[in-house]
Image: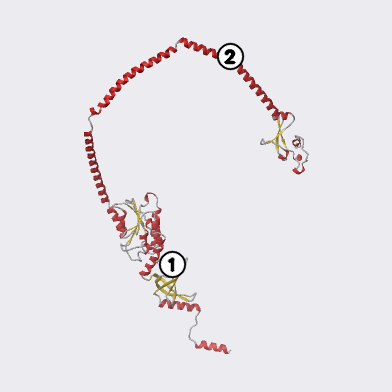
Amino acid sequence: MKLMSEAAAATAQSNLPELTVSELAQAVKRTMETNFDRVRVRGELGRVLIAKSGHLYVDLKDADATISTVMWKSNVQMLAFKPEEGLEVVAEGRLSTYPGRSQYQLIAERMSPAGVGALLAQLEKLKQKLQAEGLFARERKKPIPYLPRTIGVVTSPTGAVIRDILHRLRERFPRRVIVWPVLVQGPEAAGQVARAIKGFNAIQGGDRPDVLIVARGGGSIEDLWAFNEEIVVRAAAESAIPLISAVGHETDTTLIDYASDHRAPTPTAAAEKAVPVRAELIERVTSAEGRLKNGLVRGLERRRTELRAAAARLPRLEVLFQIPQQRYDRAAERLTAALVANTRAAQSKFDRVAARLRPEALAQDISRRRDLLARTAARLAPAMKRTLEAHKKHLDGATRMLESLSHKSVLARGFVMVHREDGSLVRAAKELSPGDAIELSFADDKQRAVVDPARAPPAESAKPKTKPKPGGAQGDLF
């Protein structure tokens, strides 16, 4: 009773309202959000976590304190850099509390590296990484075609850049231009530029560009940051189509400049690198044509002069034919004498042969050959008869041996041949099973039969040791 009275007295003496834990937490939250509704905080990124939902959770710290910081997905997508642990940043937002853990946190709406130095340090780190992989190697660079048929341009569809490129191309050498519109600034720019480069490389057929131009106007390092992103640099290095980078002004340098095949200081200069000057090309062709014609004329004149000089040094036609004419005359004389001598020799040889071809000599030779033919014919008939008789005796002997070895003679003595339905020969009773269809061949005819199940052959172990009589195994089956 005494304790209860003391507690009641203490309550009566206090004027403070009684709050629940949730009410107190909400009051603290309102107070903090009211007094710190807009703050800018500079610090180093500690723990960096991007949740599956897309929200960013980081620890912003310095040498003496740490504050939990959260950035919602909609603001994370607007970041122009990649948050990494150890990077110094400036975060802008409002302070709030997280009642579930009784801690305060910074709700960041904007975040940027702390000065250009931080961006340059991040840029240098990425540059060294990509350079170590060989993406900037000189041997990877591809030459720009001298006169491309189609030029692909990756840039913003609005603004002065695309107008400058098209205007310069019309002045120098009109070509077909395909523009892939992209954002050139902001968090979505890097992804769109990388997809545009890959998209041009995926085109097949006549619409495939012969050269690509990736262009953007000048700006701060933050404005050009999309062209320092790793996905853009890798897409440029992997491009099978020669690529010209023209990002910013002459003094601006981005990582895509190192990975591209050629760098132009301005978009206008990129157009100049892509095509030659049409008027200059026509002038060069015309000049070459004139030099070629003059060279041909001078060459013909020189050849004509040389031909005339050579003709003057040649002897006259009648002089050239004098010696050959003399050789011809002497040859004609020798030919006539040779023909006469040859005719005489041939006539003499003909006379000698004709003397041997008299009818009396031919008749004697024919008579002699007729007698020889008659004697040969008389000996031929007995020789043929003896040969036929010898072959007949040999054939008769072979026939008798064949009949003695034929299975038909064995069947005639009472034996039977057993075949299966497929025509194969059965050599032993154990090869058959009860119910098998078989064919029996006798000496005069064939009969079909079925193995009797009741008279199946005994098992291997039950066979008698004595040798069965010939034909007995087959007889036991039926």
Q: Which mark is residue 378?
A: 2
Q: Residue furthest bottom?
A: 2
In this view of the protein, which residue sits in the foreground, 144 or 114? 144
Give the residue pinned by disc 1.
73
Q: Are marks 1 and 2 in contact (CB under 8 Å)?
A: no
Q: Is residue 34 visible?
A: yes
Q: How many marks?
A: 2
Q: Quadrant of residue 394?
A: top right
Mark positioned earlier in the residue sequence (1 or 2): 1
Using residue 96 as the reference point, say whether residue 396 is left or right of it. Answer: right
Image colouring? secondary structure
The local secondary structure at tag 1 comes to: helix
Q: Is residue 163 visible?
A: no
Quadrant of the rendering where the N terminus is positioned? bottom right
Amino acid type of disc 2?
A: Ala
x then y, percent, for residue 440: 71, 33
Residue lying at 25% horizontally and 26% vertically, measured from the top left: 322
Residue lying at 60% horizontally and 16% vertically, measured from the top left: 381
x then y, percent, for residue 349: 40, 15
Quadrant of the rendering where the C terminus is positioned? top right
x then y, percent, for residue 224: 35, 64
